[in-house]
Image: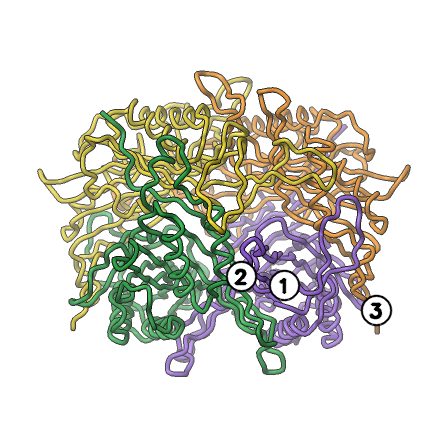
Chain colours: A orange, B yellow, C purple, D green
Amino acid sequence: MSIVLGANQYGKAENRVVRIYRDTPRHEIRDLNVSSSLRGDFEDAHVTGDQAKVLPTDTQKNTAFAYAKEHGVTSPEDYAIALGTHFLDAAPAAAGAQIKVEEYVWDRIVVDGEGHDHSFVRRGTETRTAVITVDGRGPEQQVWVVSGITDLVVLKSTGSEFKGFLKDEYTTLKETDDRIMATSLTARWRHAGTSAERDTDWNASYDDIRRILLAGFATTHSRALQETLHVMGKNVLEAHPEVEEIKFSAPNKHHFLVDLAPFHLENSGEVFIAADRPYGLIEAALSRDDSSEPGLAWQGVPGFL
Amino acid sequence: MSIVLGANQYGKAENRVVRIYRDTPRHEIRDLNVSSSLRGDFEDAHVTGDQAKVLPTDTQKNTAFAYAKEHGVTSPEDYAIALGTHFLDAAPAAAGAQIKVEEYVWDRIVVDGEGHDHSFVRRGTETRTAVITVDGRGPEQQVWVVSGITDLVVLKSTGSEFKGFLKDEYTTLKETDDRIMATSLTARWRHAGTSAERDTDWNASYDDIRRILLAGFATTHSRALQETLHVMGKNVLEAHPEVEEIKFSAPNKHHFLVDLAPFHLENSGEVFIAADRPYGLIEAALSRDDSSEPGLAWQGVPGFL
Amino acid sequence: MSIVLGANQYGKAENRVVRIYRDTPRHEIRDLNVSSSLRGDFEDAHVTGDQAKVLPTDTQKNTAFAYAKEHGVTSPEDYAIALGTHFLDAAPAAAGAQIKVEEYVWDRIVVDGEGHDHSFVRRGTETRTAVITVDGRGPEQQVWVVSGITDLVVLKSTGSEFKGFLKDEYTTLKETDDRIMATSLTARWRHAGTSAERDTDWNASYDDIRRILLAGFATTHSRALQETLHVMGKNVLEAHPEVEEIKFSAPNKHHFLVDLAPFHLENSGEVFIAADRPYGLIEAALSRDDSSEPGLAWQGVPGFL
Amino acid sequence: MSIVLGANQYGKAENRVVRIYRDTPRHEIRDLNVSSSLRGDFEDAHVTGDQAKVLPTDTQKNTAFAYAKEHGVTSPEDYAIALGTHFLDAAPAAAGAQIKVEEYVWDRIVVDGEGHDHSFVRRGTETRTAVITVDGRGPEQQVWVVSGITDLVVLKSTGSEFKGFLKDEYTTLKETDDRIMATSLTARWRHAGTSAERDTDWNASYDDIRRILLAGFATTHSRALQETLHVMGKNVLEAHPEVEEIKFSAPNKHHFLVDLAPFHLENSGEVFIAADRPYGLIEAALSRDDSSEPGLAWQGVPGFL
């Protein structure tokens, strides 16, 4: 019997890179959390402790910060592609690299009706995400781009029902025509193509998909969270042919109607308790019947799908 | 020697009360985290285990939910005053009560340029707060109201310096003319008066004070976070004579300029690392020279001040 | 073009099930966090909102609690196998199910040198884990068992070096012969076999593997965290032939030597700052050359591997 | 009208100081989270932005690390007294200083029945705490010491009842003779004396008080959490005459008996759901009838008391 090293990767996680553009008095800010990892022929480091092929995680960190200046950050996707393809050059033993970026969004502080030049306030709980996976070098190199959003917290106070479900001897849930539906949405979508060179306007694409997701949630009469997600994903795929696939992970954040009858009060959908745990969890993937194969795009991306 | 019971209180913390107003198709939502506590003559429960005077924390919870319907939630302050004064009636052994409310803010989802009737998205990281302290009954009853905001995350990419400070043998910090200044602000302000009956427009007051705080942060050239807080507080006290006192707790969330010289790159205020810990922590209270005494208003409110 | 539903699953996450055994005055406690999910033919729920095949997540929750009594909890693995196979019977549309369990460990409070009968104190930060994946019914049914541990926080104050690594133009890290090595370990190991009926002593297996992991960390002179993990995994696989595969995810929790030279103090490995972010992240899988195929065992288990 | 600066303080929070003692091959580790703050005549910094009297928080950080070497860390209390009194010398404008320390406890990893020389595993969720408050200089200087423990998670599976409580129209709670009682205890105790020079064995004192608290929790038949805390505190004050006062903050972490009747199962105290929110919250202070005045000991210490 002998022991075999299987899949492995290493890198530096959660570099908090803040990039200020200050070429004019009207500053721009990009606020990122960047994680990088390398995959490939690093068996020596594991088996004999020999680090000769290992580009240190500290160097990966330095590069993440240097690239914020050298390459710049016009979007999480563009920056991550530059960083990920660079690591294939820097570490000859690497067969691939993955860059994960979270971006925190800031709004300008409004003073006398105008957005301030260099003062900002954090917007929302939501985070924009990008995961870039690079495989190989030269003409064979492939680059997959998965964009996304996480912690988008939304709630409908009506327009949601849940009934007609399967019942067994452990079922006590009552059917309902009208409930609160709330979730903290994670969505990720894979862009077409595997070239490092793209002319996609990543920011415009993100903004429009976010708009479509919110509108779909708002306007769909929901017979289940599954159905709502399906409509949201369908709308994205129909409006964005360059998106090949979209995946959702959506906790059903339960809001239970409080029983006020003991206090001789009616409660027709007015007073709820927001529960922490347990919560429902709905996950689903949508694509087109002619979507391309995902390759390595989803490997290492959180979520079962 | 004998053992003496000193200060004590008990209650139910973090009731997640969600109140929907659905009298018209255009719903309103108030999303609260409510904690109540009672103080007074509860020595028997501690010393002999006799619960005869103890209004259970479970009952306090029930009441928090029932009052969301019976009294309603037009503002955290108004709801908390009603709840707090009720407990003095319900628990004869109580000498006082304190109600703490956090409110999470929701915006309407925008569909085709219009805010949706019943679909909402969580706004920002910030939380509106209110702490109501009630003491006594009948004509002697006093009610203090402390409103506030917490987790208001703001950042200036310039307009902040730090120099001319005291130096000793452990000082290595360089002086700077231009740095990022960022904080996650907690501010709390005490309203004048101790009557349960008020005609204050709590929501308008909150909105305007929030606006003043943000504008003060944005427009003050800062020689220290202390100075910025001072201007922000001064502006609030000057514009709102009904505010007697304001207190700040502000972590100085350090953004360190990354040294890119080893990579032959200039970094003139463009690339920063956002640090987690340690962080500076600045706390200060401001009032007018003729402000009223705070009484019990601040007892039990987080913060040293 | 038509839209296609891909992989999907749904369930109830984080049921906090506490089971007390009180058949004798000496109670036993099992404290679990249980998540269940079903996979299969649930397309109607997504596409048309028809819930006829959907066993509600609320029913899954009820079953998790009922099974703590009906089946009992002698180990997370045994309980999860019972729960997971049950769901295949309860939901005809399900093709498979996955049960994830976290167990929090409690020690007896020691009074006068003896463990108390019914009073307990939470041990450590570590959590025992189990992920059970069930696929199919009847004779074709397969059940994979992945046991594990997470948040096992360990530190070596010497016996760790890092040198001889690859350098490029972004490398500034100094080589070191002696550093602190610390991690918050996640390890997961797959048990041989796919039968629901097992006579494995899950608790004894877990205790011994935990012991081996800790001893391997303690006694290995480390030239990289990769090497330490490799020895730990090798030791497990050699001692436990019933374990087919083991996977690690280990943040390198950096402890940086503080530069005390400006204060005319020597610091020969005595004063460190424990950093939060960024951190290194090492992930690796080990198996035997004749290990069985993993099948669906790892699908949906957190980690890239 | 003029604006008045009230109470204020500033400092550096959460310095993660790790001190290794390596004089022999058998290392010792002290793992601290240290926060310092200064109070006094810092009005110029607030009002005019003049930092001439301000010892930077960065210097406070440097000093916290340097003192881990220069003074050493035999206990959180001893280290914090040295650091706090130093700051009064370093910052002439300071009238007082407060040092807060959290200590994380590590056990030696056991290998072949022996604790390892330099490999450690984090113990428990509990944290040892110390808050030192210094006021004044020279012969008038006063130093208060408050030691404590936080996040000590304990649970009794029987020996706890709750009945005979006050009922009103919002009361629905049933009385019970037997329930789970669980809490995550915070206790803080004030030591006698205000001299900086002490010959207290801080570590022995802490260990014994922790032992008394646990034993009191375990062996008290509880008619309310209030009563349990009272016994625990009484036991400490009776055994430790040098402790003047003890304060508790104890969430009542509810474990609700699950209703299994719909599934035709009995549940006589066997299956519970551990709830997150809301939770009861009990706070109480105990002292002796001849205890000294607390002075500034509790100012700025979290908790209402």
Q: What residue sits right under mark 1 in the picture?
A: C180
Q: Nearer the viewer, residue C142 or B94?
A: B94
Spot occupied by residue B201 in the image (x, y as percentages of width and height): 27, 25
Query: As displayed, is residue C122 above or below residue A78?
Result: below
Label 3 close to label 1 by CB (< 8 Å): no
Residue at image x 73%, y 55%? C305
Q: Nearer the viewer, residue C232 or C37?
A: C232
| Residue A199 in view of the camera | yes
Name the front one of labels 3 and 2. Answer: 2
Q: Give me the disc on residue D18.
A: 2
Spot occupied by residue B110 in the image (x, y as percentages of width and height): 52, 23
- Check disc 2 and give the amino acid type: Val
Label 2 close to label 1 by CB (< 8 Å): yes
Q: What residue sits right under mark 3 in the picture?
A: C290
- Name the element at disc 2: strand
- Name the element at disc 3: loop
- Check disc 3 and give the amino acid type: Asp
Spot occupied by residue B162 in the image (x, y as percentages of width and height): 48, 35
Q: Give me the disc on residue D188.
A: none
Q: Locate residue B163 relative to residue C187 in the image: left or right.
A: left
Q: CA distance from mark 3 to mark 1?
A: 36 Å
Q: Earlier in the sequence, mark 3 or mark 1?
A: 1
Q: Which chain contains the residue that carries disc 3?
A: C
